[in-house]
Amino acid sequence: MRKLFLAFALCSSLFSFSQTHQDSLRFLQQVAGLYDLDFTEAEVDSFQRNLLNMKSLYVQLHKELPKNDIAFPFAFNPAPYGFAVPKAQQKIAWQLPVNTALPRNKNDLVFYSVTQLASLIKNKKITSVELTQFFIERLKKWGDTLEAVITLTEDLAMEEARAADAEIKKGLYRGPLHGIPYGLKDLFAVKGYKTTWGAMPYKDQVIDE
């Protein structure tokens, strides 16, 4: 259907002449045939209006493109009209494993789940600094081979790890991701670091936002 719509939008922009309803149906059947699609006249008649609506939306979307810092509305909100989401944050009982132990071989940490690592940090069996340093060393060792990392933000990672350890030491545990080292896709802008979007034309791009 997407191919058919794109072809229909292209062809309808090239040909602007008066035609009957039957002409339109035959035209759509001909366009569909270009993509080896075979529709009866009744089938074409049933989706013609949808194609026209899709074309109208397509045109509206391209009249004014949003700025780069505006996220696209990919999320679907099924809430009924007038429904208000409660603003008060309720306490969440995180179900973390309680008996997680450090492995004899430290390299086995790579096979631990996030909840297992969170349990180790929460119960102070390992610090965020230790865990972060462990994964940084692995990235340094295998990064060139795996080609999985564009920019290694070591200084920032260690700074955040030390801050997390300081909070946990004071008894402030924010949740399962507190102190867990993480990676961001290179579409995210981080101040002071390159944001290459994984593409050569932007290999030196820096977006300080």
Image (spheres, rainbow, N blue to C red):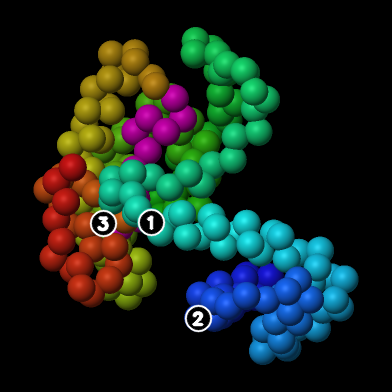
Examine the image and state in which quarter residue 126 appears. top left
Image coordinates of residue 93 in percent, x first then y, are: 57, 18
Q: Work out whether 192 lies above or below 41.
A: above
Q: Nearer the viewer, mark 2 or mark 1?
A: 2
Give the crowd class for mark 2: few <14, some 14-19, many >=20 residues within 10 Å. few
Query: Would you say 78 lies left or right of 161 here?
Result: right
Q: At 28% from the left edge and 13% from the top edge, which residue is drawn?
A: 170
CA distance for labels 2 and 3: 58 Å
**Disc assigned to residue 63:** 1
What amino acid type is highlighted by mark number 3? Glu
Q: Disc 2 designates what residue?
A: 14
CA distance for labels 2 and 1: 19 Å
Which region of the structure is painted magenta?
175-186
CA distance for labels 3 and 1: 48 Å
What amino acid type is highlighted by mark number 1? Lys
Q: Work out whether 177 lies above or below 149.
A: above
Q: Work out whether residue 130 or residue 171 is closer to the camera in this orientation and state it.
A: 171
What amino acid type is highlighted by mark number 2? Leu
Q: Work out whether residue 51 or residue 144 is closer to the camera in this orientation and state it.
A: 51
Q: In terms of sequence position, does the residue under pointer 2 or pointer 3 come before the other?
A: 2
Q: Disc 3 designates what residue?
A: 137
Query: Secondary structure beneath disc 2?
Result: helix
Query: Secondary structure beneath disc 3?
Result: helix
